[in-house]
Structure formats: structure tokens, C-alpha cells
Amino acid sequence: MKIGIVFSGGGHYLEAMNACRTLVGQGQHSFFYVTYRQKHPPGGGARVHYVAHPKHGWAARRLWLLLINFVQSLAVYAKEKPDLIISTGADVTLSIMLITKLFGKKVVFIESGANVTQPSLTGRLIYRFADLFIIQWQELKTHYPRAIYGGPLL
């Protein structure tokens, strides 16, 4: 099985690595990462694809970066042809997860541990089509009734 692990920097990266440690350690699956260029790139020997980070700037710039992110994510999908995408968010995640779902593959989203009582924007958008949605805090069950409680990753 080919699995893409998608994340932003900081805590999203650490949560993704903690969540996928067992899968990666088994050596039974092929992995790749999708993220934006950052000071400390992900390690672990997997291929890394960098996409635009649609977070910074004024609204028109963010929309432009989101479009670039979508095109780059489509290219990553076409190259890798993943069976599954797992993500801990945030903004770089939406395009590749939507593309993956449109091609009939599975998507798993893990809501950020930083969101204890209120859902993230990315989580609210992806919840609608995720095959598996995992929360790290029971308090979020009121916002995500179909979610599975997985406990904290950090």
C-alpha cells in the first residue's frame, strides 16, 4: 500500500510522525511526505514533496497560493498514486486530501491536539469527506459526532 503523510510544520509534523510511527516502522508500506518548505525538513528516508503554503499574505495572495497548492498537489497525486492519505493538517492538507478523495482513495484526518474545544478550519472542511476522522480530545465529539477518539499524540 502506498501512503502519503501530509502535514504543516511544528506540532502538525510531530503529531503526524507519532501517529504514523508504527506504520512506517513495519516496513510493509511505501511512504511519502507532502509539506511546505521549512527550516527542518522531515526525515526518515521517505520521499518529500513540497507544495505552496497558502497561509501568508492578504486574501488575494492566499487564494493564488491555494491555487498553486492545488496544482502542485495534483502533480504529487499523479506521480505517487497513493492508496491512502493521512494528515494532521493544516493548510497544505486540503488540496491533496480533496484530490485523493475525488480519485476514490481513502483519507484519514487527525484533528490537531491544539484544538481542545473548538474545531480547526481545516478539520471542519475535511470532516465532510474523510473516511476516518480522529480527534485527540473528547470535547470535540460535539463538533464531530462521527469522529473516533484517539487520545493525545504529544
Image (tube, rainbow, N blue to C red):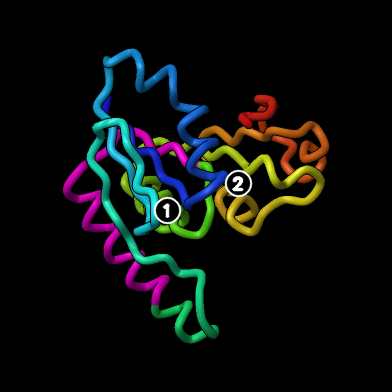
- Report the residue at 63% width, 43% height from top: 112
Residue 86 counted in the magenta span: yes
Question: Is label 1 in a helix, a strand or a loop?
Answer: helix
Q: Which residues are magenta?
A: 65-87
Q: Position of residue 91 (x, y in %)?
A: 50, 59
Residue 99 counted in the magenta span: no
Crowding at dot 2, Cα within 10 Å, few <14 / some 14-19 / many 20+, comes out as many
Residue 43's label in the rendered image is none
Q: Which residue is mark 1?
A: 98
Crowding at dot 1, Cα within 10 Å, few <14 / some 14-19 / many 20+, comes out as many
Q: Residue furthest front?
A: 39
Amino acid type indicated by mark 1: Leu
Q: Position of residue 123 (x, y in %)?
A: 61, 50
Q: Which residue is mark 2?
A: 127
Sooner in the amino-acid sequence: mark 2 or mark 1: 1
Q: Position of residue 128 (x, y in %)?
A: 59, 49
